[in-house]
């Protein structure tokens, strides 16, 4: 049985988990091709104005798969961290896909995965129900789940070591390491789809910097610094972005010279998190330079490059004209 995984939204976080789990259950996994102009245009055709750009791109990836597979893999990812949710549009994604493309229940894998109340045990029950679409053998499902979890842990460890998802998934060439770094914040589907972000990671690297993303920061460190926020948001990825930003604002790495926050223009959670990060940046007596870049279907590459170049000039001016942030004589 051919199962299609659209290359969008949570794909760059869970791809190896999903692929391993499905293949261990006997499925042939097919992924949509890397995002292209054609895929984006098709997604824009099907997507309504009110939904954000990444969801429109996801719909383009669905269209690239729908006639090639027996089943579309669009699980209802309610939560993958206790007490928190995913974005409402991710929660409603199976309904959006089913209604737009007129799919029957037999054509879409849309089981609910929800860790909000009882953590991974509750999420695993959803995965077991998903596995029962392929086999009634509970032992086989448990073994598939165990192997998928192992592969996922190894993938996350590689990300923390500094490897980018596109390198691991598509074999994309690694970037040249640089001594100085930029902290690049944002949702994984913005940071890791080089087409829709107009190769922002490669552009920053060419300007002389390596990249640090939330995927490269240990979860316990993110959660530790998130405690400084009086009331974290309801959304897991937003909390990860904010916790990562605070970890570098509060405990300075002298090699990290600035923060760039990549956001989707129509994303409600992004607008909230961007405001919070901006406030924390202003509160810090010796803060880091901060740039917010908004991405949507109308964003021009020339404008993005101009803003990045100006930001790099600002970071370098700050280094050469102001007392070091890390001087032992600097105010604490």
Image (spheres, helix red, strand yellow):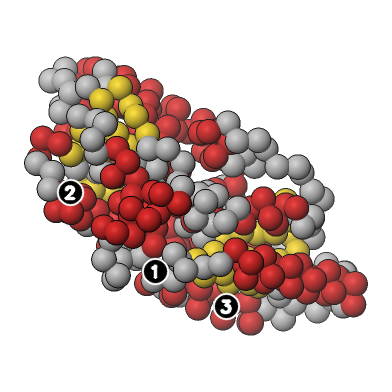
Q: Position of residue 116 (x, y in %)?
A: 28, 53
- Quadrant containing the N terminus is top left
Q: Give the mark count.
A: 3
Name the residue that disc number 3 marks.
278
- How far apart in space, not on screen, are marks 3 and 2 (Cα)? 40 Å
The residue singled out by tag 2 in the image is 101
Q: Secondary structure at mark 2?
A: loop
Query: Tag 2 or tag 1, which sits nearer the N-term?
Result: 2
Mark 1 or 3, which is nearer the eye?
1
Task: Answer with the quarter of the image where residue 175 lies.
Answer: top right
Percent position of residue 140, x then y: 24, 17
Mark 1 and mark 3: span between their CA atoms?
16 Å
| Residue 146 in view (yes/no) | no
Residue at figure coordinates x 60%, y 53% from the top left: 199
- x then y, percent, for residue 309: 74, 68
In terms of secondary structure, where does tag 3 sit? helix
Of the numbered discs in the image, which one, if any, rests on residue 267? Answer: 1
Relative to residue 123, is residue 248 depicted above or below?
below
Q: Is residue 324 left or right of residue 182?
A: right
């Amino acid at each position: 049985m051919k199962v299609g995984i659209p290359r969008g939204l949570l794909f760059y976080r869970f791809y190896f988990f999903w692929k391993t789990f499905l293949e261990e259950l006997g499925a042939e996994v097919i992924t949509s091709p890397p995002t292209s102009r054609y895929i984006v245009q098709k997604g824009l055709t099907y997507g309504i104005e009110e939904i954000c750009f990444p969801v429109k791109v996801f719909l383009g990836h669905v269209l690239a798969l729908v006639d090639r597979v027996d089943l579309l893999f669009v699980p209802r990812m309610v939560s993958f961290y206790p007490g928190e949710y995913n974005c409402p549009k991710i929660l409603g994604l199976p309904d959006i896909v089913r209604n737009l493309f007129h799919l029957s229940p037999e054509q879409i894998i849309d089981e609910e995965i929800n860790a909000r109340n009882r953590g991974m045990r509750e999420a695993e029950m959803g995965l077991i129900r998903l596995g029962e679409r392929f086999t009634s053998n509970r032992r086989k499902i448990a073994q598939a789940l165990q192997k998928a979890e192992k592969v996922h842990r190894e993938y996350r460890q590689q990300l923390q070591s500094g490897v980018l998802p596109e390198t691991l998934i598509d074999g994309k060439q690694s970037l040249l390491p640089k001594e100085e770094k930029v902290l690049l914040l944002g949702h994984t589907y913005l940071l890791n789809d080089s087409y829709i972000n107009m190769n922002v990671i490669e552009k920053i690297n060419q300007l002389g910097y390596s990249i640090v993303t939330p995927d490269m920061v240990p979860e316990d460190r993110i959660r530790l610094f998130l405690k400084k926020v009086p009331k974290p948001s309801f959304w897991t990825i937003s909390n990860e972005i904010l916790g990562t930003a605070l970890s570098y604002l509060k405990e300075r790495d002298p090699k990290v010279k600035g923060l760039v926050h990549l956001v989707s223009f129509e994303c409600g959670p992004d607008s909230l998190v961007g405001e919070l990060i901006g406030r924390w940046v202003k509160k810090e007596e010796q803060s880091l330079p901060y740039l917010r870049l908004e991405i949507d279907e109308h964003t021009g590459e020339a404008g993005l490059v101009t803003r990045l170049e100006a930001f790099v000039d600002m970071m370098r001016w700050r280094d050469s004209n102001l007392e070091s942030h890390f001087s032992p004589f600097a105010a604490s």
